[in-house]
Image: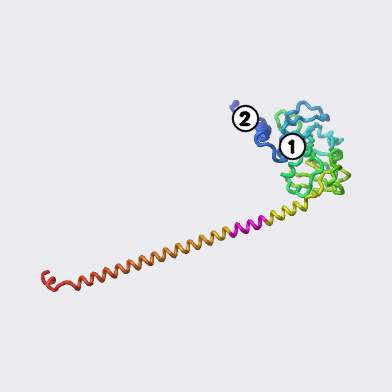
Amino acid sequence: MGSNHISPTWVLLVFLTLPTKFIILAHGIKSARLLDLAIRYYTFKSYKNFKTGTSYNVHLPSNLTGINVSTVKYRCGSLKRYGANIQEFHLGVGVDVHPYVERVLIVKQNLGNNWSNIYYDNYNQLLGYQLVSPVLGLLAYNAGDDTRFNVQFEVKIQSPKVNGIKIDFSNYTMQKNSTLHGKIQMCATFGDDGKVTLEKQVAPNICATTNHGHFGLVVQSPLLPEKKKIKKWKVVFGSTSGAAIGAFLLGLLLIAMFVNVKKKARMEEEMERRAYEEEALQVSMAGHVVRAHNNVHPHDHYHR
């Protein structure tokens, strides 16, 4: 029995590690969530006795070129007492980790200009805005002793203070882009529920939040009127197409009903014709019998 027993640890190992790698290699990355899972996979793949408080760069494969990832391990108690500066992210004093774990591995992502565009495919609310900075991500995972068994569950970083976590985009904004002249930059927070929250900056190129996640700077797209026209044209085209299809189907229904009525009428005519012919045949046969009876000679009765 012992040799056939599968421990929960190995189930987690298979579920959390192998499927992720298989999906990455077999299907590619087409969603923001799958991208996070891929980065998590390669982060823990390189996780080997990281020193607490020391930042390490994560090596990614060639199919993720353009993304820069760094990671650092903290004791949760120390993180809450002292806060931390993780490159563009400043975590103020008091930040909490939920659920509580002894150690946390914080992963900082810079998706670059190319990979940041994946958010246009996953967040429809970004329509009408354009990113003017790379998307920066801050995620956290359990870094306790059980990480050797690949129990890499995600934890939440939260600050009890308003604007307790700040993100500095000063090194990434495209100030020289003439299309951005005079436009107001907004802070975009990309939620796990697929929604985008837009808020004002707390300082030039500085955004603030109370939770971990993915963030970027956006401005209203100069192509918004054109996009609205395209969207309106699509709605009109869709409505017209729908009406045409509806009319076509209604026409088919009417034709079917007309054919059915004609067919029924022909069947009734055929039945009436047959009934008339049978009636005429019966009358003819009756007349023939009467004539035959009248033509019988009286001597016939005598001889019988």
Residue 153 colored in magenta in the image: no
- CB under 8 Å between callouts 2 and 1? no
Q: Quadrant of the N terminus?
A: top right
- Label disc, if present, on residue 154 of the rendered structure: 1
Kind of residue at disc 2: Ile
Q: Is residue 296 above or below residue 193?
A: below
Placement of the C terminus among the 4 image quadrants:
bottom left
Instruction: Give the secondary structure at mark 1.
Output: strand
Residue positioned 81% across, 27% down in the render: 51
Q: Is residue 251 left or right of residue 73?
A: left
Residue 273, above or below 232: below
Which contiguous range is marked in magenta?
237-247
Q: Which mark is residue 65?
A: none
Mark whose residue sits in front, 2 or 1: 1
Residue 104 showing in the rendered view: no
Residue 132 vertical placement versus 280 (above, below):
above
The CA span between labels 2 and 1 is 24 Å
Judging from the image, what secondary structure is the residue with disc 2 in? loop
Is residue 133 toward the left or the right of residue 45 in the image?
Answer: right
* Residue 196 relative to residue 14: left or right: right
User: Considering depth in this image, is 209 or 145 the residue closer to the camera?
Assistant: 209
Label 2 neighbour load within 10 Å: few <14, some 14-19, many 20+: few
Q: Residues within 10 Å of mark 1 (few under 14, many from 20)?
A: some
